[in-house]
Image: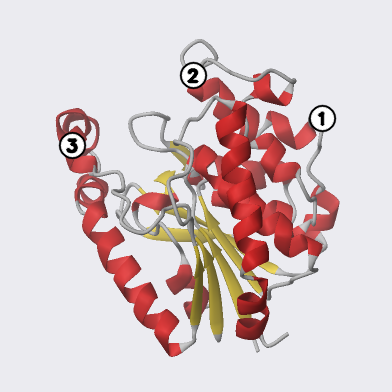
């Protein structure tokens, strides 16, 4: 049976995912297919290399990594922090094990949103370290905050725009069952890009009309996606892990809040370990 793992992004909210995944690593849980978008790409990569604790470490602000209790989201700069996450961290204090990732023999895809088409595209990379990091960086290029990324002559932004949780891709790739890790608790209001129309209009509407349309419809896509996942869960083909209450915000800079969100994910995954094993028939 082919079981896939679909990982949502959410910037530092994915420290919840880090807690969930570390609990699973402790139980030696493996999947046949992995797909992540945005920060979920890093979650997938570190799970495959079984580098327990690494994703929790690198998703935090550098000042917290260095032992401080707080970071300044303005002075420290969101863009600098993201460059550090996508590039510097790969060779930093806890280097990413490229050799193990490239030789793992497991399928791992990363979801990006194509500016030209306004559709999802999925990439794999098992040879070039730079290209792998470029793909992950592109998958996290949130409109308004980060520059558009270029891969193979095409332009891309955050994968969360068109495929916030890539569970459909997992089924398309032949998975019989899919486990989902989301960073949104039930009833949470997700980012509605319509609120930023006055900013996004001059940025994208003329040059990338299909991307602009995708941004304006993202809130509907989220609603439809969760409704569909709940139906699939009832049929026994999908299992959702998500927070039961509010987590830290997207750009959290407080160690206590980040630790609380990580611990929430870890304890939640431990509490539902039997559910996971029964679903995977382990």
Does residue 151 appear anywhere in the picture?
Answer: no
Q: Position of residue 19 (x, y in %)?
A: 65, 51
Q: Nearer the viewer, residue 57 or 90?
A: 57
Does residue 63 appear anywhere in the picture?
Answer: yes
The N terminus - image quarter: bottom right
Q: Mark 1 highlights which residue?
A: 93
- Looking at the rendered structure, which numbered label has been put on residue 195? 3
Q: Residues within 10 Å of mark 3 (few under 14, many from 20)?
A: few
Q: Give how far apart the Cα atoms at labels 2 and 1 are.
A: 22 Å
In the orientation shown, which residue stands out farthest toward the top? 75
- Looking at the rendered structure, which numbered label has been put on residue 32? none
Q: Give how far apart the Cα atoms at labels 1 and 3 are.
A: 39 Å
Q: Nearer the viewer, residue 277 or 232?
A: 277
Write down the quadrant of residue 155 in the picture.
top left
Q: Residue at x 33, y 47 (%)?
A: 115
Q: Earlier in the sequence, mark 3 or mark 2?
A: 2
Q: Mark 3: which secondary structure?
A: helix
Q: Mark 1: which secondary structure?
A: loop
Q: Mark 2 highlights which residue?
A: 73
**178 to 151, vertically: above or below:** below
Is the Cβ of the residue at disc 1 closer than 8 Å to that at disc 3? no
Q: Mark 2: which secondary structure?
A: loop
Q: Residues within 10 Å of mark 1 (few under 14, many from 20)?
A: few
Left/right of residue 215 with respect to residue 51 in the rendered view: left
Write down the quadrant of residue 156 in the picture.
top left
Q: Residue at x 47, y 52 (%)?
A: 183
Q: Residue at x 74, y 71 (%)?
A: 29
Q: Position of residue 228 (x, y in %)?
A: 33, 75
Is the Cβ of the residue at disc 3 closer than 8 Å to that at disc 2? no
Left/right of residue 84 with respect to residue 96 in the rendered view: left
Q: Give how far apart the Cα atoms at labels 3 and 2 are.
A: 22 Å
Q: Nearer the viewer, residue 139 or 51?
A: 51
């Amino acid at each position: 049976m082919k079981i896939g793992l679909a990982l949502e992004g959410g910037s530092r909210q994915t420290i919840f995912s880090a807690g969930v995944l570390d609990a699973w690593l402790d139980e030696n849980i493996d999947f046949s297919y992995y797909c992540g978008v945005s920060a979920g790409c890093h979650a997938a990569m570190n799970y495959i290399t079984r580098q327990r604790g690494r994703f929790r470490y690198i998703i935090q602000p550098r000042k917290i990594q260095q032992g401080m209790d707080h970071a300044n989201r303005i002075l420290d700069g969101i863009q600098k922090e993201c460059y550090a996450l996508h590039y510097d961290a790969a060779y930093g204090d806890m280097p990413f094990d490229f050799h193990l990732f490239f030789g793992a023999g497991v399928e791992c895809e990363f979801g990006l949103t194509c500016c030209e088409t306004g559709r999802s595209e999925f990439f794999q990379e098992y040879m070039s370290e730079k290209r792998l990091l470029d793909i992950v960086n592109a998958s996290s290029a949130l409109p308004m905050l980060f520059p558009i990324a270029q891969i193979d002559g095409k332009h891309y932004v955050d994968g969360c725009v068109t495929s916030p949780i890539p569970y459909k891709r997992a089924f398309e790739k032949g998975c019989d069952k899919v486990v989902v890790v989301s960073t949104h608790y039930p009833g949470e209001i997700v980012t509605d890009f319509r609120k930023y129309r006055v900013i996004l209009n001059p940025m994208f509407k003329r040059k990338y009309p299909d991307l602009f349309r995708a941004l304006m419809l993202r809130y509907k896509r989220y609603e439809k996606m969760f409704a569909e996942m709940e139906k699939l869960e009832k049929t026994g083909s999908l299992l959702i892990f998500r927070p039961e209450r509010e987590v830290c915000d997207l750009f959290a800079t407080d160690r206590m809040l980040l630790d609380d969100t990580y611990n929430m994910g870890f304890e939640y995954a431990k509490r539902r370990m039997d559910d996971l094993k029964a679903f995977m028939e382990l």
